[in-house]
């Protein structure tokens, strides 16, 4: 298995090379040069597998044994997923109104990012120890990515991590999960800006290939292929959970509803679809609706980022959209390069009619308001005594709307975070938050971060910080 940039400027890159990269040198994103196609026999065999076993099988398709031998790969994944609080790692809750909720938030930070990030941390540690290397990780976050990234590498001797968070635009719990970490290899910047704005200096640094090479700079945002790769397993597991009572030879369609921000998770769903899993995808967004407009109208145009109750989805420039378009364009890198150059220059793009048609064939979409989120949280509590986080409520809102129209379609809603992380939203829904002890303890810890104000030169400050870390580690 080799990897290529979505823009065609680099190809035949091995897994280790992709793992330690951010954006590709040409500004694109790495993708497999071919997507493995699974036959019915394999899918039938996988139906009985645990979530952990599915992660191993999926990863083994994209990580050749000469990169990580299979027995060592299994051990790394076992270690990565050992910290999850539930024995099934991602249990399915089956609720009233035929609502199936895949709980992906039983990791250290109560968010689904822990699933892929914990595996990514183990893969990095494996190669760093093997090659006696040090890396600097640079991450921008809209809420959950930063804390999951920190948890996956905190205290690892060969890694320093620099995280940029949008100060005041995360929940207090999300911010504290990052700013209360005291390990010397963790460096947190609280930025006076949106998540889209703080991504800009990060992109510029990664396009400086000499700087990237000199400082062993990499990203664990969902620009990193390994994040997307691990998330493919969600779709197989959710599908098999929904079809568990069907005959062994039956592979009925299942609709999987994906709360969508940066689009890394739904990219994994598109790949699972390409691999032969009979899933129908629904991208559900908040009022930051660029993906919804792209799917519905072929309109990829940038708007102002709005602050919503589903704060981790407050993204107007979802970089993984490029991967989705590459898949829809049948890996036509020249076409993607041309389109992305136009988008980067004009901040708007009209999809070619044929490509738009293929995108519509891959997924449906829906946009959800804050009022819909609160309404859905209340309904789910009234029917089930079950609390949803605002991001999970985005998916469940779509289910409730469709359930009243078609009660027969099998559907799985992905729940990316615990309601415990969004106490203010639960209170706004006129309900009482459930607060686990580890989050109560978090609120009593001291915090530390470096403030970046609007008038600061963010790129310059980051360069100086990374230079200083490298000097210290020499």
Image (cartoon, rainbow, N blue to C red):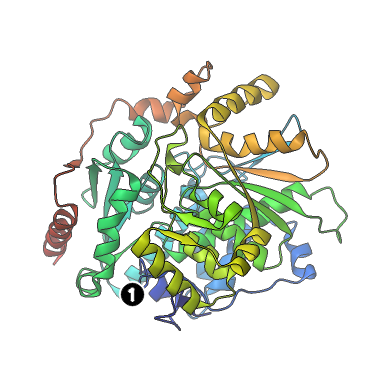
| Percent coordinates x, y for residue 393 in the rendering | 58, 34
Q: Is residue 442 left or right of residue 250?
A: left
Q: Residue at x 42, y 63 (%)?
A: 224
| Percent coordinates x, y for residue 162 in the rendering | 25, 53
* Residue 339 appears in the rendering: yes
Which residue does the numbered mark 1 point to in the structure image?
25
Which is more toward the observer, 457 or 383?
457
Q: Is residue 110 left or right of residue 196?
A: right
Mark 1 Cα shell of 10 Å, populated few (<14), some (14-19), many (≥20): some
| Percent coordinates x, y for residue 84 in the rendering | 51, 44
Q: How many marks?
A: 1
Q: Secondary structure at mark 1?
A: loop
Which is more toward the observer, 312 or 371?
371
Q: Examine the rendered structure and indicate whether residue 471 appears above or below residue 106.
A: below
| Percent coordinates x, y for residue 193 in the rendering | 27, 42
Which is more toward the observer, 13 or 274?
274
Q: Quadrant of residue 201?
A: bottom left
Query: Given the current orientation, which residue lies at the most extreme bottom position?
Result: 12
* Residue 156 appears in the rendering: no
Q: Quadrant of residue 41?
A: bottom right
Q: Examine the rendered structure and indicate whether residue 364 appears above or below residue 333.
A: above
Q: Examine the rendered structure and indicate whether residue 467 appears above or below residue 87.
A: below
For the C terminus, give its image quadrant: bottom left
């Amino acid at each position: 298995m080799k990897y290529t940039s979505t823009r065609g400027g680099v190809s035949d890159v091995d897994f280790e090379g992709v793992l330690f990269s951010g954006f590709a040198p040409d500004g694109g994103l790495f993708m497999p040069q071919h997507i493995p196609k699974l036959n019915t026999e394999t899918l039938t065999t996988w139906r009985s597998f645990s979530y952990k076993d599915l992660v191993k099988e999926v990863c083994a398709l994209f990580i050749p044994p000469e990169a990580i031998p299979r027995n060592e790969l299994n051990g790394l994944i076992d270690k990565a997923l050992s910290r999850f609080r539930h024995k099934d790692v991602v249990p399915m809750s089956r609720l009233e109104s035929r609502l199936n909720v895949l709980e992906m938030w039983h990791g250290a930070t109560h968010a689904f990012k822990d699933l892929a990030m914990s595996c990514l941390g183990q893969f990095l540690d494996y190669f760093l120890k093997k090659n006696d290397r040090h890396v600097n990780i640079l991450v921008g976050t809209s809420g959950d990515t930063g804390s999951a990234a920190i948890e996956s590498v905190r205290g690892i001797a060969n890694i320093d991590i620099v995280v940029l968070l949008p100060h005041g635009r995360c929940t207090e719990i999300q911010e504290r999960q990052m700013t209360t970490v005291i390990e010397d290899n963790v460096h947190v910047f609280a930025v006076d800006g949106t998540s889209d704005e703080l991504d800009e200096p990060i992109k510029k640094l990664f396009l400086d290939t000499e700087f990237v090479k000199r400082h062993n700079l990499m990203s664990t945002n969902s620009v990193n292929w390994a994040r997307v790769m691990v998330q493919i397993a969600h779709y197989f597991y959710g599908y098999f959970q929904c079809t568990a009572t069907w005959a062994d030879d039956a592979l009925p369609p299942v609709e999987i509803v994906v709360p969508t921000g940066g689009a890394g998770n739904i990219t994994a769903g598109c790949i699972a679809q390409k691999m032969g899993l009979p899933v129908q995808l629904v991208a559900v967004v908040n009022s930051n609706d660029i993906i919804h407009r792209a799917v519905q109208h072929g309109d990829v145009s940038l708007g102002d980022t709005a602050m919503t109750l589903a704060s981790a989805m407050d993204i107007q420039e979802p970089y993984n959209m490029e991967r989705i378009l590459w898949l829809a364009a049948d890996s036509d890198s020249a076409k993607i390069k041309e389109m992305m150059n136009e988008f980067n220059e004009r901040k708007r793009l009209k999809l070619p009619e044929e490509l738009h048609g293929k995108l519509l064939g891959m997924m449906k979409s829906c946009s959800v308001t804050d009022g819909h989120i609160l309404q859905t949280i209340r309904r789910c509590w009234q029917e089930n005594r079950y609390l949803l986080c605002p991001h999970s409520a985005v998916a469940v809102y779509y289910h409730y709307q469709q359930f009243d129209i078609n009660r027969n379609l099998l559907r799985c809603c992905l729940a990316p975070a615990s309601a415990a992380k969004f106490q203010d939203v639960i209170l706004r829904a006129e309900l009482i938050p459930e607060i686990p002890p580890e989050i109560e303890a978090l609120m009593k810890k001291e915090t530390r971060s470096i403030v970046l104000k609007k008038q600061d030169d963010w790129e310059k400050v980051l360069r100086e910080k990374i230079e200083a870390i490298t000097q210290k580690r020499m």
